[in-house]
Amino acid sequence: MPVINRLADLSDEITAWRRDFHENPEILYETVRTAGKVAELLESFGVDEVTTGIGRTGVVGVIKGRNGGAGRTIALRADMDALPIEEITGKPYASRVPGKMHACGHDGHTAMLLGAAKYLAETRNFDGTVVVIFQPAEEGGAGAKAMIEDGLMTRWPIEEVYGMHNYPGLPVGEFAIRKGGIMAATDEFLIRIHGRGGHAAKPHETIDPIVVGAQMVSALQTIASRNANPLDSLVVSVTVFQGGNAFNVIPQDVTLRGTVRTLSPAMRDLAQQRMETIVRSVAETFGATAELQFTRGYPVTVNHDAQTDFAAEIAEGIAGVGKVDHEIEPMMGGEDFSYMLEERPGAFIFAGNGDSAGLHHPAYDFNDDLIPVGCSYWVKLVETAMPAAA
């Protein structure tokens, strides 16, 4: 079950779509042009139903099998949005929009699912219904949640849902997956520390919020080193420390910001509880006051066991034995496909992007050699999960 010949033949056409998306990146929910082109292509393929405006700018296509769509309904999802990054690839199809680029490969994800949709609409070599989901705002906007809130899972009676993401550093043609948590919950925190400012030469007359903040940064690191089970993954990173604007003035206030990444609900709760205690206690120790704003972001992306085994089997049929890592280490980055996996069973898989720059890097580019591989994965998943009756 290697790469499908018809999809290899379509690679140039699919690549052209991908590069058009790359030249015209749109961020968050601004994916109006992208969604328009996706809908236009789906209609040209002859899919049975095309719906726009789901989750503001999301697109849903429905393809019915040979039996008229009776039976199971499986969904395949691709993300469409770009990032606010200035591209430095120098490619002839580089971004034409200043300050925006496809630095995560969503242009490739969209093109691959379109390629699979074209093939499935042509052949319909399956029984049941395929729902192809083109989602906006994965990069911090929770577009998956917005589509769900617009009735994605109920308007179309989706039973299982699958996602795929390119993976720099993994050879093209290879895949990686794992059961359970594969990507982390992404939470943010904001801490405001209030002291008493004054002259830097008279620190004894002040309550120095910079000193309080420094102690707080150190104390927050003990959540991972002394509160969390060493076998559980937890990251607490303070990424912003703002306070003061003169060399001889102790400021009145300091602000800390950062992120917490976890792979289980229990560890997520622990991190928030310990942060609340540390922020309050450290501030009180120095006579200051402080407030913590803890904002929960994307939940853990949790692959379901049976669907993970199935996805790995399909990937191995395309890549070959030994070319699918069944136990990839979890990534501490986040992914809003997690919301879909909270609603329905499914699995999220990584597909090799080869020796490329890393995700979210200004020199990153999606590897077009992955296109026939990714398209074949989608098609074989559908045809195997819902085989056409003889």
Image (cartoon, helix red, strand yellow):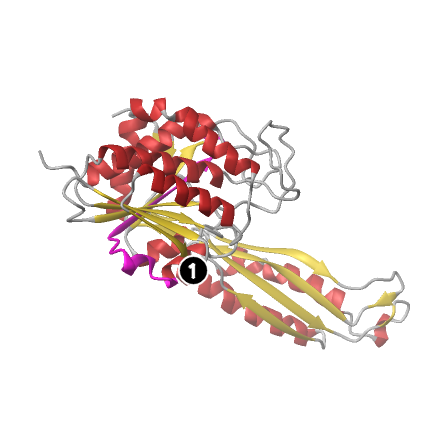
The correct choice, above or below, for 223 with respect to 202 in the image is above
Residue 109 in sight here: yes
Residue 349 in sight here: no
For mark 1, does the 10 Å Cα neighbourhood hold few (<14), some (14 to 19), or many (20 or more) residues?
A: many
Quarter of the C terminus within the rendering: top left
Which sits in the foreground, 120 or 208? 120
Q: Position of residue 54 (x, y in %)?
A: 40, 57
The correct choice, above or below, for 295 with respect to 20 in the image is below
Q: Residue furthest left?
A: 390
- Looking at the image, residue 369 sits to the left or right of residue 282; the answer is left
Which sits in the foreground, 239 or 161? 161
Quarter of the N terminus within the rendering: top left
Please state which amino acid type lies under the numbered disc 1: Ala
Residue 204: which quarter of the image? bottom right
Q: Secondary structure at mark 1?
A: helix
Which sits in the foreground, 348 or 226? 348
- Looking at the image, residue 254 sits to the left or right of residue 379; the answer is right
> Is 26 covered by the magenta stretch?
no
Q: Position of residue 79 (x, y in %)?
A: 44, 46
Residue positioned 40% across, 61% down in the render: 265
- Looking at the image, residue 233 sits to the left or right of residue 197; the answer is left
The correct choice, above or below, for 366 with respect to 305 in the image is above
Please state the extent of the stretch shown in magenta in the rendering. Answer: 149-170
Q: Position of residue 190 (x, y in %)?
A: 62, 65
> Is 165 covered by the magenta stretch?
yes
Residue pointed to by mark 1: 146
Q: Position of residue 34 (x, y in %)?
A: 48, 44
